[in-house]
Amino acid sequence: MSNKALYNNRLNDCPLTFTLNIIGGKWRLPIIWLLHKNKTMRYNELKRSIDGITNMMLTQSLRELEAYDIIKREQFMEVPPRVEYSLTDNGHDLVSALKVLANWGSKMKNILVESK
C-alpha cells in the first residue's frame, strides 16, 4: 500500500474529518446557526435570511443535514402545505461544539492581529 493510500485511509477514519465533512460547505453552517437562533423556520424564511443561496443549494443542504440527523423537517397537512425546519438533539449538540470552535477562532484571530 502506498503512503498516500495509507494517509487517505487514516484521514477517512478520523472523527474530526468526518464531522467537518458533515458541516463543511458554504451553506450548512449558516443554516445550522439560523435554526439555532430562531428555533424553527420555514423554507422561505431561510432563503431570505441567507444572502446568495439558490433554491437548489438550499434544498440540497437541507436534505443532507436532515439525512445526517442535524435538522428535522416537519410537514403539516394544511392548505396551503406548511413545512418547518428545526434542529434535532444532534443539531443542538453540534451547536455546543461549534461555539467552542468559535471561541477558539476568536482567540486565535486576536492573537494573530496583535502579533502584526
Image (tube, rainbow, N blue to C red):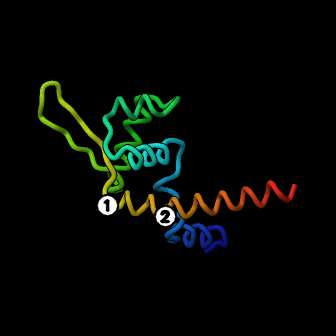
Would residue 110 be found to the left or right of residue 58 on screen? Answer: right
Identity, as a three-letter code, of the amino acid under mark 2: Ala
Would residue 10 be found to the left or right of residue 68 on screen? Answer: right
Identify the residue shown where x is 74% and y is 57%: 110
Location of residue 78 by image quarter: top left
- In the image, residue 38 lies at what x, y percent? 37, 43
Which quarter of the rendered picture does the N terminus lie within?
A: bottom right
> Could you classify mark 2 by the number of other residues whose Cα lies within 10 Å: few (under 14), some (14-19), or many (20 or more)?
few
- In the image, residue 97 lies at what x, y percent? 49, 64
Q: Is residue 2 above or below residue 23?
A: below
In front of the other: 54 or 10: 54
> Could you classify mark 1 by the number of other residues whose Cα lies within 10 Å: few (under 14), some (14-19), or many (20 or more)?
few
Instruction: State if disc 1 and disc 2 touch (CB < 8 Å).
Output: no
Would residue 103 be found to the left or right of residue 33 on screen? Answer: right
Per the image, label 1 sits on a secondary structure element best described as helix
- The numbered dot on residue 4 is none
Q: Which residue ends up furthest to the top in the rendered image?
A: 80
Residue linked to disc 2: 97
Location of residue 79 by image quarter: top left
Q: Is residue 26 above or below residue 9?
A: above
- In the image, residue 6 lies at what x, y percent? 60, 73
Identity, as a three-letter code, of the amino acid under mark 1: Asp
- The numbered dot on residue 89 is 1
Which quarter of the rendered picture does the C terminus lie within?
A: bottom right
In front of the other: 23 or 98: 98
In front of the other: 46 or 66: 46
Identify the residue shown where x is 82% and y is 57%: 114
In primary-sequence order, the first of circles 2 and 1 is 1
Identify the residue shown where x is 49% and y is 43%: 30
Would residue 84 be found to the left or right of residue 104 on screen? Answer: left
Identify the residue shown where x is 40% and y is 63%: 93
Q: How much space separates mark 2 and mark 1, taking CA atoms?
A: 13 Å
